Amino acid sequence: MTMPMTRALYRRSFDDGWLDVLTGLGLVLIGLAWLADQIVLGALVPAALAPFWTIGRRALVEPRLSSPQFGSAQQAETRRALTGWLIFGAGVGLTELAFLIFVNRGGTGLGGVGNVAVGIPAILVGLGLFAGLMLGAKRFAAYGLFAIGLGLAGAWTGTDRPGLLILLSGVLVLACGGALLARFMMRYPMTGDEDA
């Protein structure tokens, strides 16, 4: 069991905006890959960006504020939650893939499903963004609602570019993350002693 103070510190450790920047950048790159009809390349983006989490934390955050060390109870709780979200994400991804294959192969019996199908990737991105709540980053709920709304709007307007919807979701997350990171860096400037 983790202590309330540990939970509060854990939630605050994601307030610097770096998570938002990486998430937004990932969504922008995935959207661009989809727009270029390179969906497989888009699938590689999270793995390509993963190492930058640690690189960015060490270069931008830790020189300004030390990185907290959490106990085994908090680490176990985080590991369980991440495992659950990973399983959920894999299930959502497989569902999306099956649905898109069905629609692309001319599945019948679902009148108007083509319009809905174009919004599904952005809606699923929105659901995935709710994972930020697990980390205590409540702003990710707003990002998720925005992406879901964008997916629904894309389906309603009949757009045929799901990559554009993903890209636009990413632009919002990236812009907010950039603003948070800039504010963090101004609030906690590096001193000359830490540059050595």
Image (cartoon, rainbow, N blue to C red):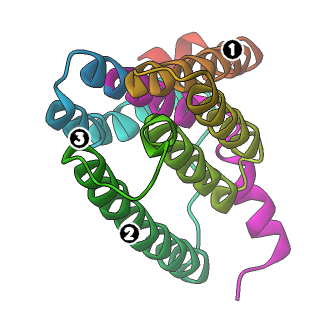
Q: Which is more N-terminal, label 2 or label 3?
A: 3
As helix, strand or loop, the secondary structure at mark 3 comes to helix
Type of amino acid at the residue the image marks with label 2: Gly
In this view, 103 is above or below 175: below
> Residue type at mark 1?
Ala
Residue name at image x 34 percent, y 33 percent: 55
Q: Position of residue 1 (x, y in %)?
A: 70, 89
The residue to which callout 3 is attached is 43
Helix, strand or loop at label 2? It is helix
Q: In the image, which residues are magenta?
A: 1-29
Other residues around mark 1 within 10 Å, as few (<14) / some (14–19) / many (≥20): some
Q: Residue at x 54, y 71 (%)?
A: 78
Q: Is residue 115 left or right of residue 11?
A: left
Give neighbour class at mark 3: few <14, some 14-19, many 20+ (Cα, 10 Å). some
Q: Is residue 166 left or right of residue 139?
A: left
Tag nearer the camera, 3 or 1: 3
Q: Main secondary structure of the magenta part?
A: helix
* Front of the two marks 1 and 2: 2
Whether residue 7 appears in magenta in the rendering, the answer is yes
Q: Which residue, given by chain and number where applicable, does mark 2 sit on?
A: 91
> Type of residue at label 3?
Ala
Q: CA distance from mark 3 to mark 2?
A: 15 Å
Task: Give 29 or 154, whichever is nearer the viewer.
Answer: 154
- Mark found first going from the N terminus, 3 or 1: 3
